[in-house]
Image (cartoon, rainbow, N blue to C red):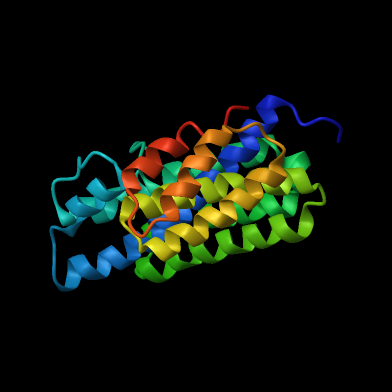
């Protein structure tokens, strides 16, 4: 397919980021739903704070209905899934119709969940189809650089979210090391000083999550 242009790199990178954003936030939303129903109805405010979005919801009921399904909410799960789909459409010739189709299926799932009576069960289908999307990225895309750019976007987004959510340090380190592998394989330009600094930080017994998040914003220089 020739040289991958800067704009196509950008679409591939954000395809990885948005699909991972939906995958991770949806998993934590489902866990939070159980917590809000069973014990802590105000947990949605903590959830918003952790993932860095403005709490505009005002109640558990409003959050549970709006955050997954409201396409006018710029932070909603469906809005981010639409963004993933928009990037996939542009890159259809590079990622393949079958790969892109799993994002369409995930969109169908989330719309079905909004209308249906088994919301949580239907939302789990979104996660399943995103996992199938990642399987297709691995199996159906022959161009190694394309695969690695998408996976780099996924890795950076997962790392950023895990840092925001306060996941255990061993999970942060595992995701970081995987992300770095894809970064090196992607052939994109990056700031070596950022990697050097993060490497030194995580080698210690106690590193600052926010500092790592701040460094990640300056990693890619492409």
Residue 176 in percent (x, y) is at: 51, 53
Residue 85 visible somewhere in the drawing? no
Note whether 13 is above or below 108 in the view shown: above
Visible residue check, residue 66: yes
Residue at left offset 45%, top offset 34%: 217
Residues 85 and 2: in front is: 2
Question: In the image, residue 12 lies at what x, y percent?
Answer: 64, 39
Name the residue: 86% across, 32% down. 2
Q: Position of residue 100 (x, y in %)?
A: 67, 49
Q: Position of residue 64 (x, y in %)?
A: 26, 56
Q: Residue furthest bottom?
A: 38
**93 to the left or right of 189:** right
Screen quadrant of the C terminus: top right
Nearer to me, 86 or 115: 86
Q: Residue furthest right?
A: 2
The quarter holding residue 14 reads top right
Image point 47% across, 57% down: which residue? 23
């Amino acid at each position: 397919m020739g040289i991958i242009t800067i704009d196509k790199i950008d679409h591939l990178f954000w395809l990885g980021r948005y699909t991972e954003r939906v995958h991770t936030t949806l998993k934590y939303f489902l866990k939070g739903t159980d917590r809000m129903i069973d014990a802590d109805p105000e947990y949605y405010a903590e959830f918003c704070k952790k993932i860095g979005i403005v709490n505009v919801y005002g109640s558990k009921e409003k959050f549970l209905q709006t955050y997954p399904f409201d396409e006018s909410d710029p932070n909603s799960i469906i809005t981010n899934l639409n963004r993933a789909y928009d990037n996939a459409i542009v890159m259809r010739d590079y990622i393949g119709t079958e790969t892109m189709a799993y994002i369409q299926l995930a969109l169908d799932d989330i719309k079905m969940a909004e209308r249906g009576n088994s919301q949580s069960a239907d939302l789990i289908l979104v996660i399943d189809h995103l996992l199938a999307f990642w399987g297709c990225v691995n199996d159906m895309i022959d161009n190694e650089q394309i695969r690695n750019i998408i996976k780099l976007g996924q890795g950076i987004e997962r790392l950023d979210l895990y840092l925001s959510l306060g996941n255990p340090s061993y999970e942060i380190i595992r995701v970081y090391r995987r992300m770095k592998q894809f970064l090196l394989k992607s052939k994109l330009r990056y700031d070596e000083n950022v990697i050097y600094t993060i490497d030194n930080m995580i080698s210690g017994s106690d590193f600052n999550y926010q500092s790592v998040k701040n460094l990640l914003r300056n990693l890619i220089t492409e």
